Amino acid sequence: MPLPSTVDCSAVGDGSAAIRELVATFVAREVTPVAAALDAEPEFPADLYRSMAALNLFGITVPERYGGAGARALDYLHVMEGLSFGYASVADQCGLVELVSCLLAGYGTDAQRDRYLTPLLAARRLCAYALTEPQAGSDLRGIASRADRVDGGWRLSGEKVFIHNAPVADFAVVLARTGERDLSVFLVDLDRPGVSRTYKERKMGQRASQVGGLRFDAVALPDDALLGEAGAGLRYMTGVLAKGRLGIAGLSLGISRAALTAATAQAEVRVTFGRPIGANQAVAFPLADAYTGYRAGLLLAEDAARLLDAGAPQAGTACAMAKLFASEGAVRHASTAVQVFGGAGYIEGCVAERLYRDARITTLYEGTSEIQRLIIARSIVDSRRAGPARSGGAA
Ligand SMILES: Cc1cc2nc3c(=O)[nH]c(=O)nc-3n(C[C@H](O)[C@H](O)[C@H](O)COP(=O)(O)OP(=O)(O)OC[C@H]3O[C@@H](n4cnc5c(N)ncnc54)[C@H](O)[C@@H]3O)c2cc1C
């Protein structure tokens, strides 16, 4: 049975071919060749980070007047997929900047945009996005970090865990409690007195992504550290999380495509009992299923991206569906790749082994699979209760 020699994503969707081409060239030249080394010696990929800024791959959906690429969510999806095909930790940086820059573009003042957004998009300052706490992950209502009003500003105390870029970031977007039921967003320079970087995690995969903790001990913040309105924090964060989930769907699809490409090539060259292993249906059928799953995931994510671009009310649910399907697919497809490689697939240095580890986090961060199911289920139950007019409503 013939197997496709590569998995092609270019035939699907109407995303800009120029952006996909740009990413594919960058990835082939600069990312794929160093992915294994970045995994083995986990370092923040500073040179790749600067190259991404130079190629305008930060702030994909941020308006051009603020220094972004002014492109669509559909383009953002394709960029994330393409970068992750090379290495997921590189895509992670693009996703992180996208979330933070959308918040700054959407809710920041001119002064805040000058201070944070412009240098962020130019790779002169690194950001972190700090929501999770020891007692608040899936349920952000449990956030205990507090920002109290004081003369001339705010005083911030609390602890954040599992934060991307915490060990290296210059500033963080921090969600903190400003009232019994109110959460607000603060822009916190991480060199302020009272801020400490508590630890750096050792992780199963995506090892070049630096993840760690932050502690705030009565940190004095100026008035203009508040982003947008006090008390609107959960609404702001929820607004960008749909795009974040779309991004992780893209990242997951990139891992799937990389796993399928490697496994297909192996199925063609590895010979047992006198013929390539891919000539056996026992090997080819799981690849056929994975290839089908990849394309289904891509179509689902492209549909979600178009809904997001159109500002459709059901975009939140669609992004949750895309993230759920693509991330669970990435874990399965990377596992299929390990199986196709046989014993070699379990050994460090084999691309399937790294992809398997890199895939595992995708069903956890940016909202676990269970939380995506909750979002989807709530939209179904709500729409039934409200009648057909609200069918498929937002999460
Ligand atoms: C590598 C990595 C990077 C991360 N980066 C960031 C970052 O940059 N910024 C940030 O703020 N956070 C980040 N996180 C945190 C991540 O978003 C959380 O770990 C995730 O949201 C889950 O929260 P939790 O770990 O507290 O799990 P919990 O909320 O304690 O959940 C534990 C389990 O219970 C399930 N569960 C919980 N509630 C329900 C329910 N009501 N119904 C059904 N199942 C439920 C969950 O799905 C999960 O399986 C990162 C985490 C990791 C590991």
Image (cartoon, rainbow, N blue to C red):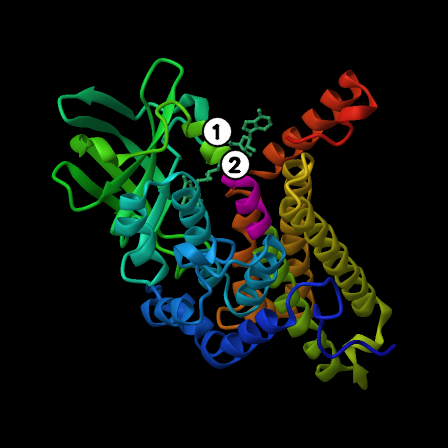
Q: Toward which corner of the image does residue 67 lie, by quadrant?
A: bottom left
Q: Position of residue 203 (x, y in %)?
A: 41, 52
Residues rendered magenta in the picture: 239-248
Question: Amino acid under label 2?
Answer: Gly
| Residue 235 badge | 1
Q: Is residue 109 visible?
A: yes
The quadrant holding residue 184 is top left
The image quadrant where one finds the N terminus is: bottom right
Question: What residue occupies the far top of the structure in this picture?
Answer: 180
Q: Tell me whether the residue at label 1 lies in contact with that at label 2, contact meaning CB atoms closer than 8 angstroms.
A: yes
Q: Quadrant of residue 234?
A: top left
Residue drawn at x 65%, y 58% as measured from the top left: 335
The local secondary structure at tag 1 comes to helix
Percent of width and height locating residue 207: 41, 59
* Residue 343: % across, % down: 61, 69
The amino acid marked with disc number 1 is Arg
Provide the secondary structure element on which disc 2 rests.
helix
Which of 36/193 is in front? 193
C-alpha distance separating marks 1 and 2: 6 Å
Q: Is residue 243 magenta?
A: yes
Measured along the vertical axis of the image, is residue 375 above or below residue 100? above
Look at 45% across and 60% down and name the residue there: 89
Residue 344 visible at all = no
Q: Left or right: where does residue 8 sit relative to residue 343?
A: right
The dot on residue 239 is: 2
